[in-house]
Amino acid sequence: MTPLVRNPRILRVVAPLAVGIALLALWQVLVTAYQVPKYLVPSPVLVAQTLVEDWGLLSKSLLVTLKITFFAFFAAVVVGTLVAFLFVQSRWIEMSLFPYAVLLQVTPIVAIAPLIIIWVKDTQTALTLCATIIAIFPIISNTTLGLRSVNPGLANLFRMNRATRMQTLVRLRIPSALPYFFGGLRIASGLALIGAVVAEFVAGTGGHGAGLAYQILQAGFQINIPRLFAALFLITVTGVLLFLLMVWLSRLALGNWHESELVPET
Amino acid sequence: MTPAMNTIADGGAVHAAGQSSSAAPVVEVLSVEKTYPNGTRALEPVDLTVRDGEFVTLLGPSGCGKSTLLKMIAGLAAPSDGRILWWRHGADAVGAPGRKLSMVFQEATLMPWARVHRNARLPLDLAGVERAAAGRAVSEALALVGLEKFSQSYPRELSGGMQMRVSIARSLVTEPNLLLMDEPFGALDEITRNRLDSDLLALWAKKRLTVMFVTHSIYEAVFLSTRVVVMSARPGRILREVAIDEPFPRGEAFRVSQQFAMYCRELSELLAVASASGASDD
């Protein structure tokens, strides 16, 4: 084997890439060989062509979905973190409120989305709200867990040195919570996107503010399967990029010290 | 104590056991007992006085309440009954100049996200000490434990023994007068432990500290202490106090001496009695 292939870093990129290319090639070959009609399964080449031809339409929808995803994610992080801080203030607060946070998590968003869309006038806001509700739970539960996961020895040390509540929070609780928080962030980023898409499916609103979910619905009705695939592709890529962004952020914050981010030496 | 010891410049002789009875009390434990809310009696009424410059070790089987006693002296737990005095005052007096107390825990308990120098600086940061002064104190403390070259390292990059040294440096930055150590070297291998024990004795002499040390190692207790307090389990109580009347500094020669073996045997016999009373549990 060449040294290039043996390098684990390169291998980590090259290996999945090779699998992807091979699968795409297989897909193209099978579709062409068996002459599968494009309204059933379009070939990868056709999907790519559609992506380019319909870029004007799709990019606008992508922007809408991205906007909803980011706003929902942002709101989930801010509100979720604040709720977590509230929870750790006292066991009483957590005991009284945590079941309702769980309620938020277990209620299917598809079931309450129509209500929210009725109650909230602006569709974009309603969709963002739905996506936020879906994305917020992992932030709340992970950050709460993190803020509580303080090394008891360190907590004693802070007490012995008469640390104020604020000092303990900033110097001990928040750093201890970071690994958990970033774990929640990864899950929430994916959920925000799922929430944005699902909510739009339910709302089914078109016109100016049409997101990728609406394009998928429409393409399905019109049996424009290549466009459906192209929209699907954009959603997937968005999800992957979001995940990678979270991984990068997490490495930036924890890379120096936390076990989860340490690269094995051998 | 030999007359020659008095000439040791670093003050080692001041610490010798024979003189301590006249020194001022640093900690006075007065009929202190501890019962946990669930009814477990961790400590029967205990009386103990530790005087300035002493190195007192609490030795006993697990469950004898030695850690509990140390935690109460540290102010981390309250006695169920009885009183503790620090420098003949209540807890409020602790922390004033000349009445400072530090504790070293069973584990190094370092902040994994902070470099060594920031870990060591923590007590000063919490007290709001100005940066330059804190930096000087940290450099000095790290030099004392032989880690000046590692101030920029993260804890995970250090061995267990080195992490413990950081923990000790952190306890020294506030210039404490009383150092409480709760089985600090229990998790380390014997070779590392012996070296840290020797270094600790040197520190004790140089800084003129009063040390209260918890261990379940007879050898460690004899090597380090001016006085060993043997405790017994279930319920926890003080069985006997044994003065280790041997001169300082103590080197490797002491570990293999006749006297060392004698003290070990005496303590070992006491511990057999102590453990017998608690045998029902382990």
Image (cartoon, coloured by chain):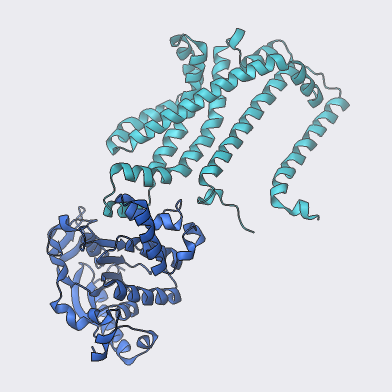
Q: From the viewer's perspective, is residue A232 above or below residue B146?
A: above
The single residue placed furthest to the right in the displayed view is A33
Which residue ends up furthest to the front in the rendered image? Answer: B132
Relative to A73, is A111 above or below? above
Tell me where residue B177 appears, x and y as whole percent. Answer: 24, 66
Residue B159 seen anywhere in this rendered image of the structure: no
**What number of labels is visible?**
0
**In the picture provided, is A164 more to the left or to the right than A261?**
left
Which residue is drawn at the image coordinates 14% and 78% (left, top)? B21
The cyan chain is A
**Residue A98, how many percent across, how many down?**
36, 32
Residue at x-position 44% and y-position 58% = B116
From the viewer's perspective, is A189 left or right of A120?
Answer: right
Left or right: B189, with B8 as reference point = right
Where's residue B29, x and y in %? 15, 66
- Give the quadrant of the N terminus of chain B: bottom left
Colour assignment, chain B: blue
Rendering coords of residue B70 (x, y %): 24, 64
Position of the C terminus of chain B, as image quadrant, is bottom left
Residue A164, image quadrant: top left
- Nearest the eye: B68 or A175: A175
Residue at image coords 80%, 21%: A46
Q: Is residue A49 visible?
A: yes
Location of residue B184 (image quadrant): bottom left
Compared to B50, does B111 lie above or below?
above
